[in-house]
Image (spheres, rainbow, N blue to C red):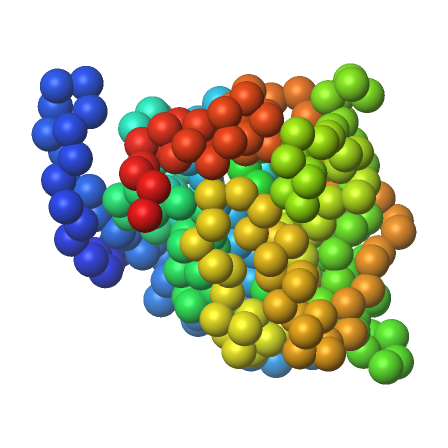
Amino acid sequence: MLECTVIQQAKASKHGGIVKALKMLAVNRSRMKTNISKHNDSPLVSVILCTYNRAHLVKRAIASVLTQSYRNWELIIIDDGSADDTGQVVMPVVKSDPRITYFYHANQGLARSRNIGITLASGEYTTFLDSDDEYRDNHLSIRIKAMENKPSPALIYGGIEYVGLPENQFAPDAQHTGRMIHLSKCYASGTFFARTSMFKKMNGFRNLPFAEDLDFIRRADKKGLKITKVKEPTYRYRVDTDNRLCDLYARGGEKAILVFRGQRAE
């Protein structure tokens, strides 16, 4: 039986009439550190997968990490207070691979969940994966290769393959109210890849209900960091799933996102 370490006791939350004690669990952490070879010459990549009520999709995302041709990675799953069966779906694969860690905490939103993942990352590099998306098998190897270019970029993004109907490949323009733009003109934070130290120096993502990726890019650009877009489409961005944040924003703005996530505007 695997050892589970309780990191933090969170506040109790009511769901379906049942009061549940929410715990932030770190599973496999010590095993992961001892099983990833210290003699591996390739840099460790920390993949941060944040999820919320996507038990029906998250297994597909995890499977796409498991099949990566680049093998030196750790997967940190941040469960942002899911009230569905996400934990039950995730735990079998967590127990089967020491490179995978699972954390559960009270709902805090996507930006804060990613920042928790950044704090916990052990890799030289950190990247992300949305729980309704997936990687192609060469995704991490392409990212590593791009970072080896001279001069090395501080941050890379892009390389998206859109999965779904063309009419669903649009999102609200965070800079122009009421305007829709194609997703290719957006900065999808799931594709961000950089040294972990860079994300930490930037203090991660600001806690915004929407367009936290655009905000991050702007802040990085103001600091004069080199930002490079990858062209080869290795990140499979699904536009055929329910309750995408951009769809919620289009229907009801930031309030709609907060309502969906059971949060209040700050």
Residue 56: percent from left, percent from top: 49, 23
- Residue at position x 68%, y 26% in the image: 239
- Residue at position x 73%, y 30% in the image: 180
Residue 121: percent from left, percent from top: 48, 67
In the picture, residue 244 is in which quadrant? top right
Q: How many numbered marks does the figure carry?
A: 0
Residue 195: percent from left, percent from top: 63, 73
199 shown above or below 138: below
180 shown above or below 203: above
42 shown above or below 64: below
Nearest the eye: 245 or 133: 245
- Residue 101 visible in image: no
- Residue at position x 50%, y 25% in the image: 252
For residue 127, side relative to residue 115 (left or right): right
55 shown above or below 11: above
Nearest the eye: 206 or 78: 206
Residue 259: percent from left, percent from top: 36, 28
For residue 250, side relative to residue 234 (left or right): left
- Residue at position x 13%, y 40% in the image: 12
For residue 125, side relative to residue 118 (left or right): right
In the picture, residue 237 is in which quadrant? top right
- Residue 103 visible in image: yes
